[in-house]
Image (spheres, helix red, strand yellow):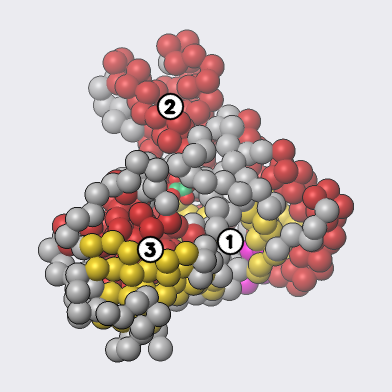
């Protein structure tokens, strides 16, 4: 019997990383997000097997695991393989007939760094299994089933942002996504700016972190608010006026969680307008305001990330910085004047090294292809 290193008859698929420009922790509140993708990829080389098992090898984790396609159940303590299992299970639930496969997985995306290594893995696996089984599904459906895989098999109550942008983003564009009706507008990123990523080195694991706690808090706030106003189906339906009126009923903690979501949705709208008018100064201010709100109201930052944001903001050409992704560690995104990008990256690496003793990884966001097969 062949093992996971037997790759005869192979196909190759890959999916990029997600970089969220603004609109953090708004997707599971039916809100607005403005992510893009970058040319860091999860790559899957897949080959058919004659039995009904999946053998997957992760080069990054240096681990090989296998499972039967006929008996996929959610694990109590999900591991990396559960993302693979979840995607296979959801593809089968969507009516795709799968055969066994050997999968060789590698990724250039820092794991647990806020660049959605997990959604990238899900989309790369989905694309690989579809192409290996000569099946197709609309990109938007693949995105939705990958989200279900993460919700049900990895135990993370994530929203739709990461899977959607990785499946459907146009290269070199930002994607304004309305997470309620899934309406999409592709927005051009002004040439006068570049996006710089710096890794704080603090790893998060979504399921272990406060991510699910935050989504529970938002659901709890909606429940309380709907008692007075049944029109409120999600935090998306709130504005500052209605929120202020409910301050007492919500209490300080839930009020601040709601305030982050309301103000962040507005920052997304303002960021789109700033990008369209190439007002990069204002875009930088919105990015900084997003960080302050995530730090103080939503409380998903941490000391190292806050320090890195301060260092980045003091560097040449940086217009604004913030934590990116779920939070509790991971990467910082900086908006930088294009002609100062190398200088900024060098200064940030040098100055953060003084804080955390090793030089941090930096990456300049590059145009990427959406998830799909490639040669
Ligand atoms: C993670 C989740 C997304 C989103 C972000 C925070 O990346 O997968 O759905 O909620 O966190 O904006």
Say what secondary structure mark 1 lies in.
loop
Which mark identifies residue 201? none
- The image shows residue 332 at horizontal and vertical percentages of 65, 53
Question: For the residues marked 1 and 2, what is the alpha-carbon distance in whole angstroms?
Answer: 28 Å
Structural crowding at the residue carrying mark 2, measured as other residues with C-alpha within 10 Å and reported as few (<14), some (14–19) or many (≥20): some
Location of residue 320 with respect to 124 vertically, above or below? above
Let me know if residue 48 appears in the view.
yes
Asked if residue 286 can be seen in this view, the reply is no
Q: Earlier in the sequence, mark 1 or mark 2?
A: 1
Q: Can you give x and y, in whole percent of width and height, for residue 101 in the image? A: 28, 75
Within the image, what quadrant is residue 64 found in?
A: bottom left
- The residue closer to the viewer here, 246 or 87, is 87
Residue indicated by mark 3: 65
The residue tagged 2 is 217
Q: CA distance from mark 3 to mark 2?
A: 35 Å
Give the residue drawn at x 74%, y 68%: 341
Q: Is residue 340 above or below residue 237?
A: below
Please report the residue visible at 66 percent of the width from the left and 48 percent of the height from the top: 202
Q: Which residues are magenta?
A: 191-196
Residue that badge 1 annotates:
110
Of callouts 3 and 1, the N-terminal one? 3
Name the residue located 37 percent from the left edge and 23 percent from the top edge.
220
């Amino acid at each position: 019997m062949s093992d996971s290193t037997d790759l005869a008859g192979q196909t190759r698929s890959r999916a990029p990383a997600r970089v969220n420009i603004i609109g953090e922790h708004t997707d599971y509140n039916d809100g607005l997000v403005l992510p893009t993708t970058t040319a860091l990829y999860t790559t899957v080389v897949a080959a058919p097997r004659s039995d009904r098992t999946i053998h997957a090898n992760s080069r990054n984790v240096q681990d090989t695991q296998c499972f039967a396609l006929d008996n996929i159940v959610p694990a109590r303590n999900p591991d990396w393989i559960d993302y693979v299992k979840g995607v296979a299970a959801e593809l089968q639930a969507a009516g795709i007939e799968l055969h066994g496969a050997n999968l060789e997985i590698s990724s250039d995306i820092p794991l647990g760094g806020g660049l959605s290594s997990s959604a990238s893995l899900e989309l790369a696996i989905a694309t690989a299994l579809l192409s290996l089984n000569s099946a197709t599904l609309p990109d938007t459906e693949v995105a939705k089933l990958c989200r279900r895989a993460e919700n049900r098999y990895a135990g993370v109550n994530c929203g739709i942002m990461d899977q959607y942008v990785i499946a459907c983003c146009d290269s070199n564009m930002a994607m304004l996504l309305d997470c309620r009706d899934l309406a999409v507008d592709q927005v051009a990123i002004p040439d006068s700016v570049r996006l710089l990523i710096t890794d704080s080195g603090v790893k998060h694991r979504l399921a272990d972190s406060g991510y699910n706690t935050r989504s529970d808090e938002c659901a709890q706030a909606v429940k309380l608010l709907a008692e007075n106003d049944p029109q409120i189906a999600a935090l998306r339906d709130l504005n500052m006026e209605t929120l202020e009126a409910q301050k007492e009923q919500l209490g300080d903690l839930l009020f601040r969680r709601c305030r982050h979501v309301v103000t962040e949705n507005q920052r997304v709208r303002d960021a789109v307008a700033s990008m369209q008018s190439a007002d990069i100064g204002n875009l930088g201010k919105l990015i900084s305001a997003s960080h302050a709100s995530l730090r103080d109201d939503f409380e998903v930052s941490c000391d190292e990330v806050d320090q890195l944001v301060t260092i980045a903001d003091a560097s040449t050409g940086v217009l604004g910085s913030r934590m990116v992704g779920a939070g509790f560690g991971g990467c910082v995104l900086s908006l930088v004047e294009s002609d100062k990008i190398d200088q900024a990256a060098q200064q940030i690496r040098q100055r953060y090294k003084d804080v955390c003793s090793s030089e941090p990884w930096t990456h300049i966001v590059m145009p990427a292809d959406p998830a799909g097969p490639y040669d």
